[in-house]
Amino acid sequence: MKTRIAFSKGFLPCAILSCLIIASGVFSFATRGINLGIDFKPGSVEEVTIKGAAGIEDVRAALSGIGGVSVKKVGSSSDGYQIRAGVAESEGGKITEALVNKYGEGNVDVLKTDFIGSSMSSSLARQSTFLLLGTMLLIWLYATIRFHWDFALGAIVALLHDICIMFTFITWSQLEFSTTTLAAVLTIVGYSINATVVILDRVRYNLPLMEVKNFKDLLDQSLNDTLARSIITTVTTLFAVVALYLFTTGSIKDFALAMTVGLLSGCYSSIFISSGFINFTRRDWRPEYGIHHAMPKKSQGASAAV
């Protein structure tokens, strides 16, 4: 058996590199914080009709002097917009004032005005955290039943790695963190676990078939077997995501940017982080004992199971 690429040689360097990147994200979070969108902080929400507006970008430009503005189309009318801004309830009139200055008083009609209080935004943040933790728990349970505890834990480590890398990017770039960005994070969690499970399944398939001196050889061969699949699925998905980034605006553009970072990180972590962790947990593995140091020799007719 000849291994085309010795992925195992990159396990430790990649782990060190990832730790340094994540540490920089922690530093950025402590010094710069996260640019929270209106979904996660108090602010005003207005639904208006604007005659003469050239589109969402034109309305957003008119509100450039107000922080944390989000604009989207609402209703069946082409003139209907929903505007969310991070302003206090007493300052809600700033939105209408800026629109009137741009388009004229007779061209702006306020249909509805609401204020999102701090308790609501805090509740949304807690629910988002519980949603993410619940997703991780269910994935861990599935991987434990499907494979083995160390395979499952390796998959979770890779997912946590991807989430940390995405948040590192968000803190350094100050990309607005909204429910759309959170959707990108959850999407990457599902995408990354799928890529990792394919690799783990190949490791389990190769385990009873290959004569190897150590577990690194088994991982290297399994990673080579699935390399083409990992690259092709990532690249084809990137085609669609990059197109979204290039040809859209607003929150969809932010979603595509976060997805691009997550896709690259997911491919990388499935190959180096998850496999590296599993290799660490099985560093004393011996072929004559299979997985748990209790497996009889292959000549006795036993097969290994993960």
Image (cartoon, helix red, strand yellow):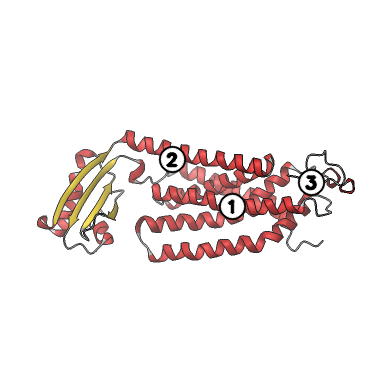
Is 198 or 179 nearer to us in this picture? Answer: 198
Name the residue: 55% across, 46% down: 22
Dot 3: few (<14), some (14–19), or many (≥20) neighbours within 10 Å? some
Q: Nearer the viewer, mark 3 or mark 2?
A: 3
Q: Earlier in the sequence, mark 3 or mark 2?
A: 2
Label ID, residue 304: 3
Dot 2: few (<14), some (14–19), or many (≥20) neighbours within 10 Å? some
Q: Nearer the viewer, mark 3 or mark 1?
A: 3
Is 306 or 50 nearer to us in this picture? Answer: 306
Residue 45 coordinates in the image, percent (x, y): 25, 45
Residue extending farthest top: 119
Label ID, residue 128: 2
Q: Secondary structure at mark 2?
A: helix
Q: Amino acid at mark 2?
A: Ser
- Is label 3 in contact with label 1 (beta carbons under 8 Å)? no
In this orientation, does residue 77 appear?
A: yes
Name the residue: 72% across, 41% down: 281
Q: Earlier in the sequence, mark 3 or mark 1?
A: 1
Residue extending farthest left: 106
Horizontal side of residue 13 vs 3, given as left or right: left
Q: Please give the residue where the numbered disc 1 appears in the rendered image.
A: 194
CA distance separating discs 2 and 1: 22 Å
Residue 174 coordinates in the image, percent (x, y): 41, 50
Name the residue: 86% across, 45% down: 288
CA distance separating discs 3 and 1: 23 Å
Q: Is residue 206 above or below residue 36?
A: below
In this orientation, does residue 66 appear?
A: no
Q: Earlier in the sequence, mark 2 or mark 1?
A: 2
Name the residue: 22% across, 61% down: 78
Residue 29 coordinates in the image, percent (x, y): 46, 43
Q: Nearer the viewer, mark 2 or mark 1?
A: 1
Q: Secondary structure at mark 1?
A: helix
